[in-house]
Image: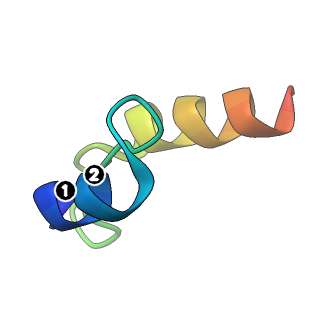
Amino acid sequence: MRRELVAVFGEGSVGLQTFSSESKQGVDEARAVVSGWLEL
């Protein structure tokens, strides 16, 4: 998936963050990324 997005948008403008809402794995990391986007 990341490779396809980089091909369209270019390196450095694409990030991929995985998480599981069920097991809560990776949720804190995803929350930090989204907070950064929203400047929270």
- Specify the quadrant of the image occupied by residue 40: top right
Residue 8 appears in the figure: yes
9 sits left or right of 24 in the view: right
Residue 19 appears in the figure: no
Q: Camera-side residue: 2 or 37?
A: 2
Q: Camera-side residue: 26 or 2?
A: 2
Residue that label 2 marks: 6
The picture places residue 23, in percent across and down from the top left corner, at 21, 62
The picture places residue 3, in percent across and down from the top left corner, at 13, 56
The picture places residue 16, in percent across and down from the top left corner, at 30, 49
Q: Residue at x 73, y 36 (%)?
A: 37
Instruction: State whether residue 4 is above or below residue 40.
Output: below
Q: Secondary structure at mark 2?
A: helix
Q: Residue at x 44, y 35 (%)?
A: 28
Instruction: State whether residue 35 is above or below residue 5.
Output: above
Count of numbered labels shown in the rendering = 2
Q: Look at the image and name its color scheme.
A: rainbow
- C-alpha gap between disc 2 and disc 1: 6 Å
Q: Residue 25: which disc?
A: none
Instruction: State whether residue 26 is above or below residue 32.
Output: below
Residue that label 1 marks: 2
Mark closer to the observer (2, 1): 2
27 sits left or right of 20 in the view: right
Q: Check contact, mark 2 vs mark 1: CB within 8 A.
A: yes
Instruction: State whether residue 4 is above or below residue 38.
Output: below
The picture places residue 36, in percent across and down from the top left corner, at 70, 27
